[in-house]
Image (cartoon, rainbow, N blue to C red):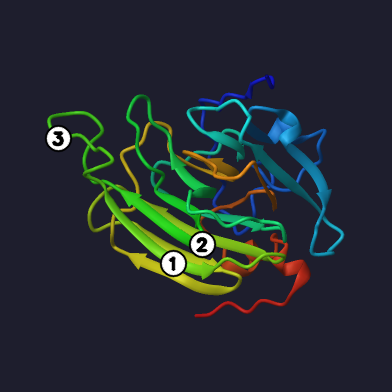
């Protein structure tokens, strides 16, 4: 049986300075030697995460994540996920960039594969992530969950009573980068909060003045990699991912997108 590696998330949050710069002390591109000082890895086997050259030919180092159906489950699912250590925010603006590349041998299957999340930290409640990027068969979907209810009390937030949206983003294409840039103004309060998402330079989702998260313990935090919450349906899953990039309230699309593999492999002009 593979040795279980689960590095616990640090319980003290880190605040980003209000600046127009990517915060390079949280997440970002790092060497294998420096990885443990900047990221948490959740995987049954540390060898499930490797440093490799960008398969698109940019010459940059990226990560290769894999999961096998024989792996031991971690927190109830099969996963090889990374998250920036000590990166949480309860309310307010944060920018994120998460990028993935599906190899030519990717096998479509109806069982869902989650490759990116903006999750929420809870003590005991089990709630779906406010933002999830999911492969269903041959499609890439955006799933959004939120709840204005308190976590405790007579009518607490639960999965069944949470608001849910599912948006089809694309018919999955292999051998190309999918680069997601997200601006989130987090809020569980009705009439507040906003989300704007770019995929490969195009605006694919935008909503404002609407609650988009939960009352949260430590805050919301990003994750990327492979997470299979149920059955796999195939023996192995593998994809490439870039490192997770985090930006403060005064960031912009151009600065965040410049951190992604798409900026090094093709010219991208954002839609307005």
**Depth order, front residue of 2/146:** 2
Split into 4 quadrants, where in the image is the N terminus?
top right
Which residue is disc 3 drawn over? 155
Q: Earlier in the sequence, mark 2 or mark 3?
A: 2
Q: Is residue 178 left or right of residue 36?
A: left
Q: Which mark is residue 113?
A: none
Q: Earlier in the sequence, mark 1 or mark 3?
A: 3
Q: Which residue is mark 1?
A: 168
| Residue under numbered circle 2 | 140
Q: What residue lies at 44% left-to-right and 67% top-to-bottom?
A: 168
Between marks 1 and 3 in the image, the one whose residue lies nearer the viewer:
1
Residue 90 in the image, given as x and y percentages of width and height:
40, 41
Q: CA distance from mark 2 to mark 1?
A: 6 Å
Q: CA distance from mark 1 to mark 3?
A: 31 Å
Identify the element where label 3 is drawn: loop
Gap between marks 2 and 3 measured at Cα: 33 Å
- Circle 1 SS class: strand
Position of residue 188 in the picture relative to residue 66 (left or right) = left
Q: Are marks 2 and 1 in contact (CB under 8 Å)?
A: yes
Element under label 2?
A: strand
Disc with the residue nearer the chain's start (2 vs 1): 2
Q: 27 or 68: which is nearer to us? A: 68
> Residue 185 sits in which quadrant?
bottom left
């Amino acid at each position: 049986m593979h040795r279980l590696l689960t590095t616990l998330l640090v319980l003290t949050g880190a605040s980003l300075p209000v600046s127009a710069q990517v915060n390079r002390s949280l997440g970002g591109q790092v060497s294998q030697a420096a990885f443990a000082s900047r990221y948490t890895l959740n995987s049954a086997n540390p060898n499930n995460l490797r440093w490799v050259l960008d398969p698109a030919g940019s010459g940059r180092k990226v990560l290769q994540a894999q999961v096998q159906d024989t792996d031991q489950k971690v927190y109830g699912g099969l996963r090889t996920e990374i998250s920036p250590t000590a990166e949480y925010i309860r309310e307010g603006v944060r920018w994120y960039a998460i990028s993935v590349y599906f190899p030519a041998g990717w096998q479509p299957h109806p069982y869902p594969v989650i490759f990116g999340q903006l999750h929420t930290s809870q003590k005991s409640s089990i709630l779906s992530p406010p933002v999830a990027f999911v492969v269903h068969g041959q499609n890439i979907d955006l799933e959004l969950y939120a709840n204005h209810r308190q976590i405790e009390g007579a009518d607490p937030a639960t999965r069944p009573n949470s608001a849910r949206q599912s948006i089809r983003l694309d018919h999955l294409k292999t051998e190309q980068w999918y680069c997601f840039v997200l601006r989130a103004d987090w809020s569980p309060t009705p009439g507040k909060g906003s989300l704007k998402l770019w995929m490969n330079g195009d605006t694919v989702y935008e909503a404002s003045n609407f609650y988009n998260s939960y009352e949260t313990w430590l805050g919301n935090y990003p994750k990327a990699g492979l997470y299979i919450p149920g059955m796999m349906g195939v023996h192995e899953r593998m994809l490439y991912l870039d490192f997770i990039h985090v930006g403060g309230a005064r960031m912009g699309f151009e600065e965040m997108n410049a951190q992604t593999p798409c900026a090094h492999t093709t010219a991208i002009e954002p839609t307005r």
